Structures are given as C-alpha cells and as structure tokens.
Amino acid sequence: MQSGIWTVVFTEVSVADPGYFFFESSTGGPVFKDVWGGMADEGDGPEITKWAKKLGANNVIASCFADTVTK
C-alpha cells in the first residue's frame, strides 16, 4: 500500500513470521522505518493507527494499514 511518501509492504519469508515493512521516501529513495508483525483484533485499530502515526506515517496510510491488519 502507498500514500504520499509512505509505502507499506507485506512480506513473508521462510525464516521469520510475516510482517508489514514501513518505508518513507521524503529524501528520494525509500528509507526503512520499522516492521510490524503479529495478530490484531478488530478493536485494535486505534492503537495500531497510533503506532503507525508515531513513525510519521500520514493519516491515510496509518488508517489503511490498521484496517487491513484488523480484518
């Protein structure tokens, strides 16, 4: 998913749990910011949105991400 300068990539690898990798590209190329993994319940959306926004993610990508992982 992408919004503005933010990109979130879901990745599965054979040696670790799957995760959502957050990248920010205000300086041109993508810069890794953090990875989120785990299980989320429907009621976790506000906390997950807050976590993404603490990284600096915009409202659109933070809300879309939270909506995706709580479904």
Image (cartoon, rainbow, N blue to C red):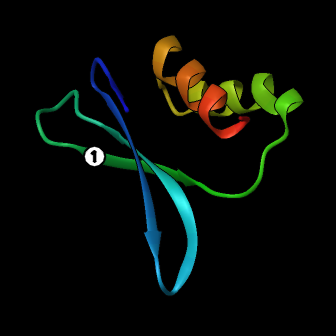
Left or right position of 2 against 60: left
Residue 4 falls in image quadrant: top left
Picture residue at 54% right of the left edge, 23% below the top: 64
Q: In the picture, which quadrant includes the C terminus?
A: top right
Point out residue 67 in the picture as x, y percentages from the top left corner. 65, 26
Give the residue drawn at x 55%, y 65%: 18
Q: Position of residue 21 (x, y in %)?
A: 44, 51
Give the farthest residue toward the bottom: 15
Taking the view exactly as shown, the residue that stands out farthest to the left is 28
Q: Is residue 36 visible?
A: yes
**Amino acid identity at mark 1:** Val
Quadrant containing the N terminus in the rendered view: top left
Q: Residue furthest top?
A: 59
Q: Residue at x 65, y 39 (%)?
A: 69
Name of the residue lying farthest toward the front: 71
Residue 59 lies, with reference to residue 69, above or below; the image says above
Q: How many marks?
A: 1
What residue is disc 1 on? Answer: 31
- Residue at figure coordinates x 13%, y 41% from the top left: 29
Q: Is residue 58 visible?
A: no
Q: Position of residue 43 (x, y in %)?
A: 88, 28
Asked whether 13 or 33 is in front, the reply is: 13
Please tell me which residue lies in front, 53 or 16: 16
Crowding around mark 1 (Cα neighbors within 10 Å: few <14, some 14 to 19, many 20+) is: some
In terms of secondary structure, where does tag 1 sit? strand
Measuring from the top left, give residue 42's x and y in whole percent. Answer: 83, 31
Which residue is at the front of the view, 43 or 26? 43
Q: Tell me where residue 2 sits by quadrant.
A: top left
